Amino acid sequence: MRTVGVASAAAALALGVAGTASACNIKDFSFTGSVTCDQPSGTGVITVHDTDGTRPVTITVKDDSGKQLATQQYTGRSGDFTISVPWSAGAHYQVLASVQRYFDNQSVGNGVTLPNTDCGASTTPTSPPASPTDSPTPSDSPTTSPTTSPSAGVPSASPSAVASTSAAAVADTSSPSPSGNLAETGGGSNTGMIAGIAGALVVVGGGAVFGLRRRTASARH
């Protein structure tokens, strides 16, 4: 009986050790699917699956430079842990798991790589701004131009016509008109009368002067 009791205790201890070793194995942790995009928040969501129920479990995410991006502790019995991380298209993140009293910050697989796409509201293509409608179009620019051109008015005289007209004008002004007034050329029908009157006045004036001289001389004697 004593031998049976010792054997039973040894078997129970072995089973307990085996169960403990299984709970503490980092290989119990894996990823469920790939990193997904939470569009309303613009963040990525990583899901880590655990096949053992030992709690609490802490999941930490770091970038390849070692900068911590997110960390969260889980105490529930669910085997899936989700954690939100900043979205950086094509970035690689390290995912570390810690089980209290068993192991600390052990890498889950080889980490995760985010899809090389945008996430969130920033991915929504924005329509280009409408082109201004108030700006003048080529048709709105002034198109009015002078409609009157030299060719549209009264036809101008040709050089030969102008020359002949000028020559005729010169000829008209240089040659006296046969039918013109003689006074304009220095002669006329009243020239003889005027000369006669002037001669008579000269004679009368001479006589008056001669008479005055004789009267003066007689008065002196």
Image (cartoon, rainbow, N blue to C red):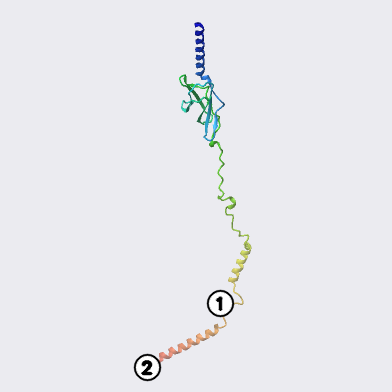
Q: Position of residue 55 (x, y in %)?
A: 49, 22
Residue farthest to the front, as pictured: 1
Residue 15 lies, in percent from the top left, at 52, 13
What amino acid type is highlighted by mark number 1?
A: Glu
Residue 44, horizontal then vertical, whole percent: 52, 30
Q: Residue at x 59, y 50 (%)?
A: 138
Number of other residues with Cα within 10 Å of mark 2, as a class: few under 14, some 14 to 19, many 20 or more:
few
Helix, strand or loop for disc 1: helix
**In this view, the mark in front (2 or 1):** 1
Kindly state the secondary structure of the residue where label 2 is placed. helix
Q: Residue furthest left?
A: 220
183 versus 23 height, above or below: below
In this rendering, the answer to whether 54 lies above or below 43 is above
Q: Are marks 2 and 1 in contact (CB under 8 Å)?
A: no
The residue at which mark 1 appears reads as 184
Relative to the observer, which residue lies in front, 190 or 162? 162
Q: Quadrant of residue 168?
A: bottom right
Three-letter code, disc 2: Ala
Ranked by sequence position, the earlier of labels 2 and 1 is 1
Question: In front: 173, or 204?
Answer: 173
Q: Which mark is residue 198?
A: none
Left or right? Give the position of 139 relative to 54: right
Q: Is residue 131 above or below residue 164?
A: above
Give left or right: position of 140 versus 20.
right
How far, Cα to Cα, is label 2 from label 1?
A: 53 Å
Q: What's the mark number on residue 219? A: 2
Q: Position of residue 89 (x, y in %)?
A: 53, 31
Work out whether residue 192 or residue 184 is closer to the camera in this orientation and state it: 184
> Looking at the rendering, in which quadrant would you find the C terminus?
bottom left
Q: Residues within 10 Å of mark 1 (few under 14, many from 20)?
A: few
Q: Nearer the viewer, residue 178 or 156?
A: 156
